[in-house]
Amino acid sequence: MSKAILNGVDFYNIFKSGADIVKRNKENLNRINVFPVRDGDTGTNLALTMGSIADEAVVSEDFDIVIQSMADIAFENARGNSGIIFASFLGGFSSACINLKTIDLEQFSRGAELAVESAYSAVSEPVEGTMLTVIREWSNYITTNHNTHQKFSDLFEGAYRKANQALEETTDMLEVLKKNKVVDSGAKGFVMFLEGFSKFIGDFIHGNEKVVQSISIGHTHAKTAYTDHQSLKFRYCTEVLLKEDIKVKSEVEAMLDGIGDSLIVTGNERLVKIHVHTDRPDLITKLFADAGYKVYKSKVDDMLLQVQVEKGAKSNIGILTDSIADIEDQQLLSEQIHMIPLALIADESTYLDKLTATKDNLSSILNQSKTYPTSSQAEVRFISSKLEWLLGQYEHVIIFSVAKALSGTYTSYEKAIESFAEDKHRIHLVDTKLNSGAQGLIVLKAAQMANAGMRVDEIINRATDDISKTKILVSLDTFKYAVKSGRVPYRIGRIFVMLRAKPIMSLSLEGNGIASGLAFSRKAADMKIYRRVKKIMKQGGISQYSIVHSNNPELANAYKVQFEELIGFPPVITTEISAITAIHAGIGSVAIAFTRKE
């Protein structure tokens, strides 16, 4: 395709060619990912960002329609530091192409110039030796040499070689790259993307010995990249998408000053994308909510857990669950338990359970929402992405789902698993038929069994046996929240609210929510729960239990003291319940979950 002018279809095809090469090489990019943190997901993030653009872009002869749709999709779906820089790059390019039906070399040059400006301006503290450096060198070649070429194939070939040269130089520009003898992973991904451009569009012959050598990543590099430790300043890689004009960029940057590092703020006149490394994702969304911004989408990755697993997984079996399972945060890290956050939806904002929606901002979310929040299972493609990473770290993955009867999450897991074809046999899905602290008990014990070296079938069999013997008793302060969330019929619930009844909730054997008792004072309800547990102790005893609560540490501690004396040992889990469970059970609820002995 030797052309001096490109239309929208031409550009879409060459973009897709570049995205496909990145997708095929994402695992190689993950292996050399050491900057800004060694979390091993740069290839995955770039592949998902570019892949979503290629999959969802509007394909038209009109160049403007194609590039503007690509820019919007990029901002909405960009993942990770490198993905958001790429989205900024594409957004800057699109701003030079408004109303262009086709694009020539000079117009492309103007787009390249604005693209590099946009990429640099998005990053609060630009660092040379990264993707930014390669983007700049590629753009400089385009703007300097577009007048000396007659067709895009020649221009792109020269620009590709310049970018490839800049890529090789990144090793000496950053100490961490030099120490690990690798090039920057994000920069490498961008050069691979450019290779796809050159491969598709012109006379450039892919397979030249020099080119193949320059883009290859040997397994030796993969091993070297993890020989030394790089500490993390912050735990979570947090991304938030606001439905705002990019004019608020400076205000957003000021709001997030001091809350973390690796800050990137980019967007267009419709969307603003924020990337930051922080310990408090929930504080970020609280700041936005208090300022009146709508959190359209968000993504949070636990970099600390990723790094721990990349450095050395405790087992060849990965344990995955969802945020409904209540487990102490330190236990998630120490046992290397992976978690999929469900979505909490409040008006036009969407929060991630236990990450951007926590006990510290739930009251704020409830107070600011015009309608009562609802919940939604994680997107299938998000689960697929998580499973893909896990399968790269473990031989098998066991998923412990919240009760199928309570949520569509189990079905989402099933759909995600179907997409893995040859690797389906490595993924094992278990319906816990439980939730909250009860689900947490099953998951924690399964992780401990995996880390002790037990086989997949042994873990699943023992977990299945424990599920049938595990129960949860929840003391609710009021029926009000269960009525608001739709878990209790309005007419019946309203009567109980008027009577100030204190319900005791539980789950059936299949995982359906059921009323398990009723009292007309909190003290009476708690006493009924105590008597039931005491009866079980007389019938055979309890092997493990947990105490969980919704912003009621005083009563939870009273439960802990009381039941430790009754049962004879402390709970294995004591923690807050998930924000999604809290909107159904209500602020102030406390529960005991336990597994009976044989």
Image (cartoon, rainbow, N blue to C red):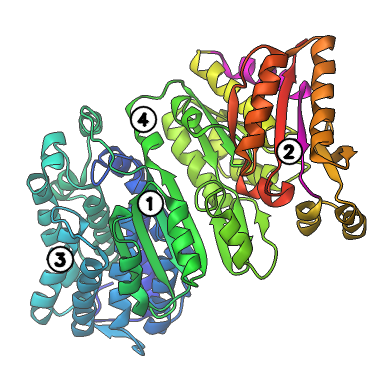
Q: Which residue is mark 4?
A: 308
* Camera-side mark, 3 or 2: 2
The disc, 1 or 2, on the residue closer to the chain's N-terminal end is 1
Depth check: give the residue in front, 171 or 126.
126
Of pointers 3 and 1, the one earlier in the residue sequence? 1
User: Dot 2 lies on which element?
Assistant: loop
Q: Amino acid at mark 4?
A: Gln
Quarter placement of the C terminus: top right
Which of the two marks, 1 or 4, is nearer to us in this view?
4
Disc 4 is placed on an element classified as helix
Can you say whether 236 is above or below 61 in the image? Answer: above
**What residue range appears in magenta?**
454-478
Q: Which residue is mark 3?
A: 136
Label 4 to label 3, Cα distance in Å?
A: 34 Å
Marks 1/2 in contact by CB < 8 Å: the verdict is no
Residue 309 point in image, percent of width and height: 39, 30
Res. 194 mark: none
10 Å crowding of disc 3: few (<14), some (14-19), many (20+): many
Query: Which element carries disc 1, helix, strand or loop?
Result: helix
